[in-house]
Amino acid sequence: MSNLRVAKRYASALMVLTGEAKNPEAIAGDLLDVQSAIRSSKELRTLLASPVISKEKKRSVFAEIFKNKIGDSVQQYLASIIEKGRGDILPETLVQYFLLRDEQLGIVSVDVRSAIEFSPVQEKTLTKQLEGITMKKVRVSFSLDKMLKGGFVAKVGDTMLDGSVRRQLELLRSRLKDGAEPMAQN
Amino acid sequence: MAEVRPDEITAVLRKQLSGFEKEIDIYDVGTVLQVGDGIASLYGLSKVMASELVEFPNNVFGMVLNLEEDNVGCILFGDDTKIKEGDTVKRTKRVASMPVGDAMLGRVINPLGQPIDGRGAIKTDKFSPLERKALGVIQRQPVKQPLQTGLKAVDGMIPIGRGQRELIIGDRQTGKTAVALDTIINQRYTHTEQAKKQGIKPVYCIYVAIGQKGSTVAQVVTKLEEMGAMEYTTIISASASDPAPLQFIAPYAGATLGEHFRDSGRDSLVVYDDLSKHAAAYRQVSLLLRRPPGREAFPGDVFYLHSRLLERASKLSDELGGGSLTALPIIETQAGDIAAYIPTNVISITDGQIFLEPNLFNSGVRPAINVGISVSRVGGNAQIKGMKKVAGRLRLDLAQYRDLEAFAKFGSDLDRATQQQLRRGSRLVEVLKQRQYVPMPVEKEIVMIHLGTNGLLDELPLDQVQRFEKEFLEMADLRHKDLLDSVAEKKELTDDAVKRLHAIVKEFIETFKIA
């Protein structure tokens, strides 16, 4: 939990760095590369989290992996975060960084789950509708969830837009239950 | 059961189902990060309010207490084993509240307003928030009506007024709950026709049991039922086996229910039994929510915890109906230590305290009230005229008796005046003794205290005083009911009444056999 707080601090520092850079897109791209590398390799994650491996070793591993692949500023950032002994929170920092960057660019990511798959036309219409509701650019990720029985659920930040049949059934049940009480007492 | 026609069922179903084709339902969610010990920390729910009710799966509800940068801390009002990490939590956009209404009278409920006496659902149509801001200065008026406890020692020397906050404090096994229960039982007369004629408004009672044994609560319920006191009483129980969050909100639930009566122009009495356990329950949830501990490991806002609760006791102005909420908080001390953290806090918040002592209790002085350090800061204004008159002497005589008590051992070596004072004092102590569950109407209290302070009992042997009281009052009830009634009606002992009373006593003492 407290890691999240630290990760937020490091991520916002990274945001400042991106803002000052001549080519912010390149930095974001480099960080995306780093993120995908960490995500794809379990060994790398273990290396970052391990307190046994020395900072020097971690630094040299990272330097070798990303040599000539990413820009100097991101390399320096990686080196410094490892130097501070915060290598373990690097994955979380990157997550927070992209959240912050989305916020800055006015993008909201929306999680849409539906009972049956959307057609491309439907997807486009939904995206447009969501953009209208949020007044921002949206990045939608679609997934399938048979448990919903019908309809779809969109999660925008902490808010759920629930149009699923499951939710309607839940509401119906509670309505019938509440409605039944006065009758039961007669 | 009445017959149900099929077309009725169809109509109801149609009505209930009409909203089925609704558009999208919008609600805010978060996820459970950690759960256990009656608390949960959540991620998300970024727009949630402090003290808002949140809904967990399996019909468990919680209340938000901590709003932090990266998580939301909340207490659970249900079984925490039904919740697991990663569960979805929904906002309800309501602050924690409970149903209130007259239907609650005679029932035993939990702090959420749900019945736990197995006598079916309680029909109420109103919800009130558990935490409410206390009333301001304009809405109040000074305490001026008496709340008779039926205990001679309390009504005489530590009078309680409607709208007052009087602390009952003492060690374990000193009769704290007994004082509170006698007070509740004594409110029975306020619900009678006779009281109505005398202009005495009925008092509705709420007994809040916090962290007590289930058996103790059951005992209280049985006793109140036996004495016919449950008709106007609600019992709110958060027993020792209930989760600490429920114990924490219990007194607020009591205050909310009391406010329902107060705000409808009626009088109510709330007993909080006891606030030491309430503070301990709050300490538990606070520590689990990682709030920093202070003195005796209580959190920094433990004073505010009790002050905002007791500040809700009040006497409303006449424009607002003149209702009142009287609070009788109870505090249990450890080995008579009233300088501990919670006792000093609550003593400073309340308008006085009734101090009960184990020494007195064990030497047979029951109720074991130490009249020296027990005070009532506002109740004096509420005392009826007759009581004020006789009680003035009582205080003085008892104070002198306490000064001289140490010399009592020397017996006949003392001069006559001192001996007389000792004799008077010891008779008064006897007069103030009272058995449990036999509260006394105020007119009888006045008569007995009058007899004591005027020396009419001085000639009786000490061990006969209580028998005298019992037999004399029985006789008075039978043969001189009109005298007692006139005292109750006029609310004072007139000169004529005094003359008549003295004659009656003289006559009775002659026939009183000293066994």
Image: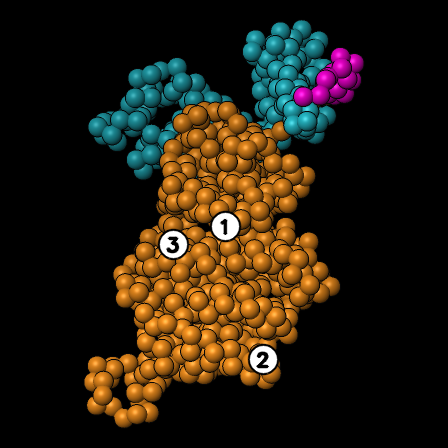
Chain colours: A cyan, B orange
Circle nearer the N terminus (2, 3): 3
Q: Position of residue A39 (x, y in %)?
A: 40, 18
Classify residue A109 as left or right of residue A86: right
Q: Amino acid at mark 2?
A: Ala
- Residue hosting label 3: B276
| Circle 2/circle 3 CB separation < 8 Å | no
Point out residue A156 in the picture as x, y percentages from the top left corner. 61, 26
Mark on residue B227?
1
**Foreground: B286 or A152?**
B286
Q: Nearer the viewer, residue B422 or B496?
A: B496
Quadrant in which the C terminus of chain B is drawn: bottom left
Give neighbour class at mark 3: few <14, some 14-19, many 20+ (Cα, 10 Å): many
- Tag 1 or tag 3, which sits nearer the N-term? 1
Which quarter of the figure has residue B382?
bottom right
Mark 2 vs mark 3: tell me if same chain. yes
- State the mark number for residue B497: 2
- Please tell me whether mark 3 sits on a helix, a strand or a loop: helix
Label 2 crowd (10 A; few <14 / some 14-19 / many >=20): some
Q: How far is mark 1 from mark 2, CA to CA?
A: 32 Å
Segment tinted magenta in the rendering: B1-21
Q: Secondary structure at mark 1?
A: loop
Reply yes or no: does residue B11 show up in magenta. yes
Instruction: Indicate the amino acid at tag 1.
Output: Met
Q: Is residue B268 magenta?
A: no
